[in-house]
Image (cartoon, coloured by chain):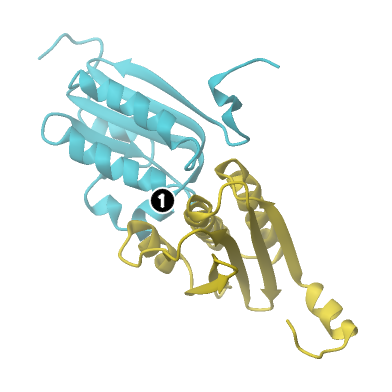
Chain colours: A cyan, B yellow
Amino acid sequence: MAVTPDDQGPTTLEVAVEPLGQAAILSATGEVDMVTVGRLEVAAHRALEDSPPAMVVDLSEVTFLSSAGLKLLVRLHERAGTTTRFGVVAAGPATLRPLQLMGLDQDIAVYPTRADAVTGLDLADPATPDR
Amino acid sequence: MGDPESTLTEEAELVDQVELRLGAQLEHLSVVRAVAAHIAMGADFDIDAIADLKLAVDEVCTDLIVRAVPGSAMDCVFRLSPDRIEACVRVTSHNDDLPKRDSFGWTVLTTLTDSVSTRLESVDGHYVIQVDIAKNRTATT
């Protein structure tokens, strides 16, 4: 059997970090539960270490978001503070619904698509050099 | 449970019941979530209610697994009735701490379900912690 970071259990979560200009976009695919939340947390904190002007956590391909995942988003939003504009991409009952039910969308900017996040967070166009 | 009911009645009750017994390990969470979602789908819950039940069951199990005696079992019972699904989850713990009602997780639970209750029983120097939740079928109009 191939040994991959996802061999920790039946829950799978893959996290990819894609820079967009100076911004960091984290896209998660799979389920965010107590077993996998650490992977998203490590990747997100690593991305925030460089104090990017903006960070997006794209949950478009996430099929389950536990309370541990919700709490992580709150912590990331707090850590981003005023240095990093922070946004989440979420749609559907697995991700957007709990964010809304818990009222987290009141504090955290939530966008239905990545394109909306790029526009909403005014992310640097990679083609244009800074300002 | 200890009622002097006839075996026939007990079997009739089991018709609408699903029982799962698994190791109290976080690695099994995805199995319990899948079963919860499957039951809610079969009961014709709408997609929001299915997601709510799945998240609530995950929350209960995560909380109880963390409290469970290492290597012990977790029992989950799902009961279907025409208007609701009940989930009862229990583990054996070394201590009598119940899920904290001022925690974020508890707020998630009470927000997503129609009823939440906890029970604590002392058995042979251990504690059995049980959390019962229920999700009503939402009016499909």
Q: Is residue B80 above or below residue B69?
A: below
Task: Quadrant for the C terminus of chain A, please.
Answer: top left
Q: Nearer the viewer, residue A73 or A103?
A: A73
Residue in the image at 45% along x and 66% along y: B96
Chain at tag 1: A
Q: Is residue A101 above or below residue A12?
A: below
User: In the rendered picture of this protein, how many numbered marks are placed on residues?
Assistant: 1
Q: Position of residue A94 (x, y in %)?
A: 49, 49
Secondary-structure class at tag 1 = helix
In this rendered view, identify the residue nearer to me: A83 or B100: B100
Q: Position of residue B103 (x, y in %)?
A: 32, 60
Residue sitting at x 23%, y 53%? A106
Task: Answer above or below: position of B28 versus B83.
Answer: above
Tell me if residue A5 can be seen: yes
Residue type indicated by callout 1: Ser
Q: Residue A3's quadrant in the figure?
A: top right
Task: Say whether residue B5 is left or right of residue A24.
Answer: right
Q: Residue at x 23, y 35 (%)?
A: A86
Residue shown at the point (44%, 47%) measured from the top left: A95
Residue farthest front in this picture: B125
**Residue extending furthest right?**
B8
Q: Which residue is mark 1?
A: A67
Residue B40 seen in the current view: no
Please state the horizontal and vertical placement of residue A88, each as a whole percent of the image: 32, 38
Say which quadrant the N terminus of chain A sits in: top right
Q: Residues within 10 Å of mark 1 (few under 14, many from 20)?
A: many
Quadrant in the picture for residue B28: top right
Q: Nearer the viewer, residue B15 or A100?
A: B15
The percent position of residue B23, horizontal first and vertical second, equals 65, 48
* Residue placed most toward the observer, A59 or A38: A38
In which quarter of the view is residue A76 placed? top left
